[in-house]
Image: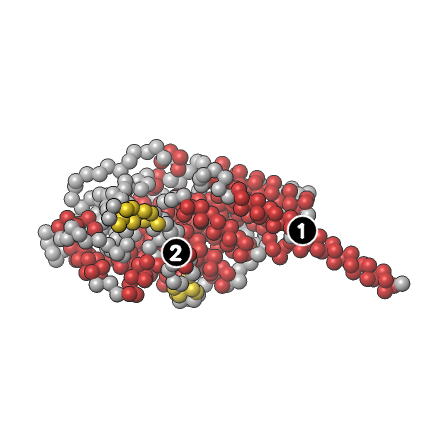
Amino acid sequence: MKIFFAAIAAAFVLVSCSDNTAYIKEIHDPILYNKTVKKLNDIVLENNFPPMVGARNYAYANIAAYEVIVAGDSNYISLSGQIRSLPPMPKPSKDDKVDFQFAALIAFCKVGNAVTFPEGSMDTYVDELKQKAKDAGMPSSTFEGSIAYGNKVADSILSWSKKDNYAQTRSATKYTVTTEEGRWIPTPPMYAQAVEPHWMEVRTLVLDSASQFMPVRPPVYNIKDKNCAFMKELMKVKGIVDSLNDEQKFTADFWDDNPFKLNVSGHVMYATKKFSPPGHWMNIVGIIADKKKADFDETVYAYAKASIALFDGFISCWDEKYRSNYVRPETVINKYFDPEWRPYIQTPPFPEYTSGHAVISAAAAEVMTDIFGDNISYTDTSETEFGIAPRSFTSVRKAAEEAAISRVYGGIHYKNSCDVGNAEGKLVGQLVIQRLHMKK
């Protein structure tokens, strides 16, 4: 009889555990968070968001998820009071039943939905997440409580985000194209208008101001003196592009990250898309977090901190781009040396100095190194969906350096702009590390 009752008790315990905790293995899987960020990344790609706007999308969504994690994990510290104007976040009451990892996914998706378009882009994915939680046995009280809390934090983040001056920049004046020598003008084949000339007016997260790390002045434009710094930089770009080897082409292609490339073949024009630079770095965060076997909460922390560095990196870089309004190599080479010359990759539609990819890659790499340590070897598979082979690196800092030099191989930047941009990005990343105390 004792054996019978013991068996009944054991069965009850097993059923109880199955009913209440079996979902944890699935919902708390950090790979699920990686997939959720990738879903937003896909939406950013599909809808042609410029890279700096994409960085804004990633930052706010990841911050929302992080603030939910903070409420449930005492190892992490809220960003309220640490980043620009972020108010205290709502806390669940002691009676609320919240699975904080599920709530973090909900918060990420709600913010991602709100800062992208078309409206409701993530709705189907959210329905899939909810069904996954139900199928895995999440109790209904926890299910409802988690959704309610995730939405509450998301609403707070969205209210804060609307005060960052982004909306006001939508109606700001456009860049003025002039014939002044050395000044940026639209480039072939799209001859598109300058992208986001007022991005430096968007509220920073950690930087004191957009100009906090204003770089040194670029070489003075001068095509009359072949021995001047500008001409040496220009001829260096032309010489490299005119004699690219296979490894240099692979490097340029791997870091191209052009969210909207216009291909022209005779009278036929069509566009191809890839992740923009911040989207590429979001993928890298997931790859490194997985390699280091980070749990769900640490994975969210890594994404949030890296996305903050990317966000402020773009503001710092764009502040300089539209201060110097520096001409692209393609423009000068076409006008004075070879009208048929083209860079290996397509020149993006904004001024040259400094290199955006160099800045934001270095900023992200500093943060990633701080979180996971230096000299982490990894293989970046981000570009395989675009038909580009994986590439291996011995550290994220080495990857950032390669991202910078790739723009010279691509023919769209002077080497000086990439070197200075890399240094600028490191300063941004180091400031994020210095000022944000996110983990106890």
Looking at the image, which residue is at 52% across and 46% down?
Answer: 108
Q: Please state if 357 lies on the left or on the right of 85 as rendered.
A: left
Q: Residues within 10 Å of mark 2 (few under 14, many from 20)?
A: few
Q: Is residue 395 above or below residue 306?
A: below
Callouts 2 and 1 close, C-beta under 8 Å: no
Q: Residues within 10 Å of mark 1 (few under 14, many from 20)?
A: some
Looking at the image, which residue is at 32% across and 47% down?
Answer: 270
> Quadrant of residue 285 in the image?
bottom left
Question: Where the N terminus falls, by quadrant?
Answer: bottom right
Residue bearing mark 1: 137
Looking at the image, which residue is at 26% across and 56% down?
Answer: 344
Residue bearing mark 2: 386
Distance Cα–Cα, label 2 vs label 1: 37 Å
> Quadrant of residue 192 in the image?
top left
The number of discs equals 2
Asked whether 67 or 126 is in front, the reply is: 126
Q: Mark 2 or mark 1: which comes first in sequence? A: 1
Residue 29, numbered circle: none
Q: Is residue 285 above or below residue 207?
A: below
x then y, percent, for residue 124: 53, 44
Q: Please state if 220 lies on the left or on the right of 318 as rendered.
A: left
Q: Is residue 427 visible?
A: no
x then y, percent, for residue 224: 10, 51
Q: Amino acid at mark 2?
A: Phe
Q: Which residue is most to the left?
A: 224
Looking at the image, which residue is at 71% across and 52% down?
Answer: 19
Q: Is residue 246 visible?
A: yes
x then y, percent, for residue 327: 21, 47
Q: Please state if 234 lies on the left or on the right of 437 as rendered.
A: left
Question: Where the C terminus falls, by quadrant?
Answer: bottom right
Q: Amino acid at mark 1?
A: Gly
